[in-house]
Amino acid sequence: MKKKDREKNNKKEPSAKGSSIKAKIIGITIPIIAVLVILMILLAYNISSRIIKTNARDLLNSSSSYQSSSIASWLDQNLSAFSMAKQTIEKTQPKPEALQKILNSTYGYNANYPDGLYVADMQGNVMKAANSEKNYANAKESIWFQEGLSRVNMRYGTAYKNENGESIVSASAILNDGTDNVRVISGDVSLARISIIVNSFVKMDKAAAFLVDSRDGTILAHRDASLVSQKLDTSNKDPLMSEVAKKLKARDYEGCDLADNLVGFDMIDGTDWVLISYIPEKIIHADVNSLGIQMGIIAVVALIILIVAIERAVHMIVKPVRSLTNTITTMADGDFTIDVNAKGRDEIGKMGRSVEDFIVSIRGMLHQIRGISDQVSNQSETTSGLSGEMYDAAQIQADSMTNLNNTVDQLSDSITEIAENATSLAMVVADTKTTSSQLENCITQTVAASEKGKSDMNHINMAMDTISNSIQKLDAAIGKVGAASEEITNIASVIGEIAEETNLLSLNASIEAARAGDAGKGFAVVASQIGKLAQTSTDSVENIVALISEITNLVQETVRQAAESIKNIDDSSEMIDTALKTFDVIFDDIHTTGELIEEIMEKMGQVDDVASNMAAISQEQAASTEEIHATSENMVVQANSIATGSQSVLDDAQKLSDSANTLTNQIARFKI
């Protein structure tokens, strides 16, 4: 039976939740190899790309150099023919007829310049081949004539369009034919012909080239015929043309990458022309990309082969480890009856033999632990019983001491409360006695103040009587003044009447004096003075009457106010009399209150003595109760400590018993 179990254990696979060593090794190795392969592919791709680009640049430079040499050779060949014809004319210095024959012989001589040579002088006259149909109107102002005047040897000039609309470039120079007339000899080369040469001499597949005059940026040759004779500009819509224009403007003829193109520059010997050769980089990288795809396919195949090889190798290495893992898993389940078949001399073999030795040691140890566990279990049961009995006794004692302590605590609280109340009563009585003494002093002061107030009120009453008498006398005097004012008014009235009568008599005397004539003039003067005196008296009487009237009004107002003052004084006198009577009543009550307070002071002294004695006795009882309470608390603490210790012993005994049972259960799990 054990052998079958071991076979089952040996066939156990790792848990699905965990990851096997095989999966880990493959999971780590394969990504690393994949990354290395990808890095190698990328490195190979970059190296190949650089090599191919370098080779392409070299090939482009070689092609450009070959093109420029071929173009220069072609141009030199034509230029040599032009120069030879020029030298022949200058040596022979022919007559016009002979010169015409020479020019006729150049017509159709070479396909590069089918119209042959022609000669123009300062007067604008042009000699050309008889069969030539070209029109050389206004030759004196033409580009080829102006450029020819500036050089002795034949040389190519600036490209232009002739009168027939053809894009050409002329080789011209001054012709020294022995005459006094300045002449220029010239020969035309078609730019279309140059374009054919430029495009046909490209050695590199899918590369292109165009020819530019560096002096003004004129395109001399291009596969796009519409661009011939146009000028390069940095604002050109074509990015390549724009970048080339910048390079030519800077006189920089080094090969470089421009607008995703590999570009090479080469000067044409004997000219100011620049041959620009270029090839798109995507064409260069096409082979590299193809190579990259092939390398990627090879890498995928290699990875698949490596994965299979690594999986088989790891399987062979991990197989004994898996067997050992199954053995250890069986041991972890508690079965130590399993045997280990260790093979090999490597680390895994050593590990298997070590596990076998470990199983043997564990078997012996488990036998010893099982015996010790049984002994501990028996002892723990005995200890647990004794601890339970001790805990019950300690618990009963603790409960009894707790009840006693609670009773003593309540008694102590009651006595303490009585002592506090007695002390509070003694303090209240003492405070009341002190307050009564202060009240007695205040009442004594109040009696003295009342007596003084009563004396002051008597003085005020006497003063009010004196004021009333004085005002009455003033009223009588004012009455007399009023009577005198009336008499003065009557006298003034009489004086006024006398003045009026005197004034009438004066008026009558003046009338009579006027009747008497001269005899009455002196009497008239006297009458006039009497009239004035009477008028003055009347005015004075009116003033006196007005003043007396004002005095009378003032006297009447004074009389009215004096009457009101007398009435107010009478009212005040009545109020003072009432106050005097009230002071008498208050004075009698204060005396009675003082006598009662003296009696209260005597009683409060007796209560203070009783409260003080009661507080002292209560404090002594409270102190004794505190001592009893402290003793009771110590006994309760000791009882609780005993109960706690008993509980701890019981708990420890229970834990020991549980540990013994657990140990027994754990040992029972192992098969030995």
Image (tube, rainbow, N blue to C red):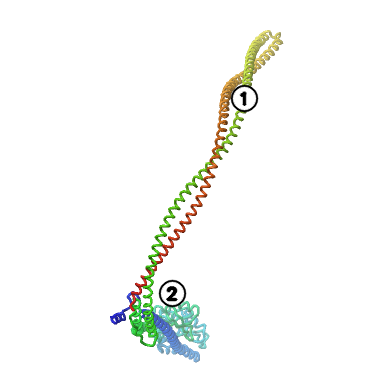
Q: Is residue 191 visible?
A: no
Relative depth, front residue between 379 and 563: 379
Amino acid type, mark 1: Ile
Relative depth, front residue between 455 and 488: 455
Q: Secondary structure at mark 2?
A: loop
Residue 473, image x, y percentages = 64, 18
Q: Quadrant of residue 658?
A: bottom left
Q: Which residue is mark 1?
A: 460
Q: Is residue 460 above or below residue 483?
A: below
Amino acid type, mark 2: Asn
Give the quadrant of the C terminus: bottom left
Residue 339 in the figure: left or right of residue 493: left
- Residues at marks 2 and 1 touching, judged by CB atoms closer than 8 Å: no
Give how far apart the Cα atoms at labels 2 and 1 are: 129 Å
Residue 570, image x, y percentages = 58, 21
Give the crowd class for mark 1: few <14, some 14-19, many >=20 residues within 10 Å.
some
Check residue 236 in the rendering and tell me which mark sits there, or answer none: 2
Please name which of the two marks, 2 or 1, marks the residue nearer to the observer: 1
Residue 286 in the figure: left or right of residue 217: left
Q: Quadrant of residue 170?
A: bottom left
